[in-house]
């Protein structure tokens, strides 16, 4: 499974990209009022950067630091990100419940070192080989490879079938 896209980064007001919580991803003022996923996606990271949605294009890859998705365990956060057109998220680590919710919705999460990945870099992620390749044609970025934490077979299958619900529709249960 190969994913290619341009990098978008998000930062808190203190300049850190660690501990981006679910309330930063989608504010509570939208979580319970908006049911349409596409509409929800129009409001991601609004409290951190009111113009963030205007900067992203379908297929972009979101990159952050440690403990991405901490906070509330509701599925609205990964749903809003996916609905905004983000193809995958790369971070050094993810909050456990966010991680599970994202894979349930077929939103790929990749764990690896992120400090050398810059805004607007163009990446190729090979989930089966376990590498991120920087295809950016500037400086010494071209073809730099980063090893990623391998995804379990079950998670790869969820991504390939479109998430947990689609997996159950197809296989009528777990077949791992």
Image (tube, rainbow, N blue to C red):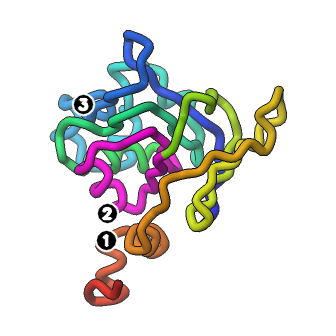
Tell me what residue is drawn at x 34 percent, y 50 percent: 79
For the residues labelled 2 and 3, the Cα–Cα distance comes to 20 Å
Task: Indicate which disc, 2 or 3, sits on the residue closer to the N terminus.
Answer: 3
Residue bearing the label numbered 3: 23
2 up-or-down from 171: above or below: above
> Does dot 1 land on a helix, a strand or a loop?
helix
Q: Is residue 101 magenta?
A: yes
**Residue 77 appears at what percent x and percent y?**
30, 43
Numbered badge on residue 104: 2
Task: Tell me: 44 left or right of 30.
Answer: right
Tell me what residue is drawn at x 58 percent, y 67 percent: 128
* Quadrant showing the C terminus: bottom left
**Residue 101 appears at what percent x and percent y?**
28, 55
**Residue 169 appears at what percent x and percent y?**
32, 83
Residue bearing the label numbered 1: 164
> Does dot 3 land on a helix, a strand or a loop?
helix
* Mark 2 vs 3: CB contact within 8 A: no
Task: Indicate which disc, 3 or 1, sits on the residue closer to the N terminus.
Answer: 3
Residue range highlighted in magenta: 85-111
Tell me what residue is drawn at x 37 percent, y 26 percent: 18
Task: Indicate which disc, 1 or 2, sits on the residue closer to the N terminus.
Answer: 2
């Amino acid at each position: 499974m190969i994913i290619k896209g341009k990098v978008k980064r998000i930062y808190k007001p203190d300049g850190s990209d660690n501990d981006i919580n679910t309330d930063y991803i989608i504010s509570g003022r939208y979580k319970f009022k908006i049911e349409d996923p596409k509409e929800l996606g129009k409001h991601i990271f609004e409290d951190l950067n009111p113009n963030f949605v205007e900067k992203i294009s379908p297929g972009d890859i979101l990159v952050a630091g440690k403990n991405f998705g901490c906070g509330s365990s509701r599925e609205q956060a990964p749903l809003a990100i996916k609905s905004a057109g983000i193809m995958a998220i790369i971070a050094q680590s993810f909050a456990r419940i966010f991680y599970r919710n994202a894979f349930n919705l077929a939103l790929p999460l990749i764990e690896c070192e992120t400090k050398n990945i810059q805004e607007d870099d163009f990446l190729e992620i090979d989930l089966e080989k376990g590498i991120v390749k920087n295809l950016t044609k500037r400086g010494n970025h071209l073809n730099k490879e980063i090893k990623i934490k391998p995804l379990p077979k079950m998670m790869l299958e969820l991504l390939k079938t479109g998430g947990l619900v689609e997996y159950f529709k197809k296989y009528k249960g777990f077949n791992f």
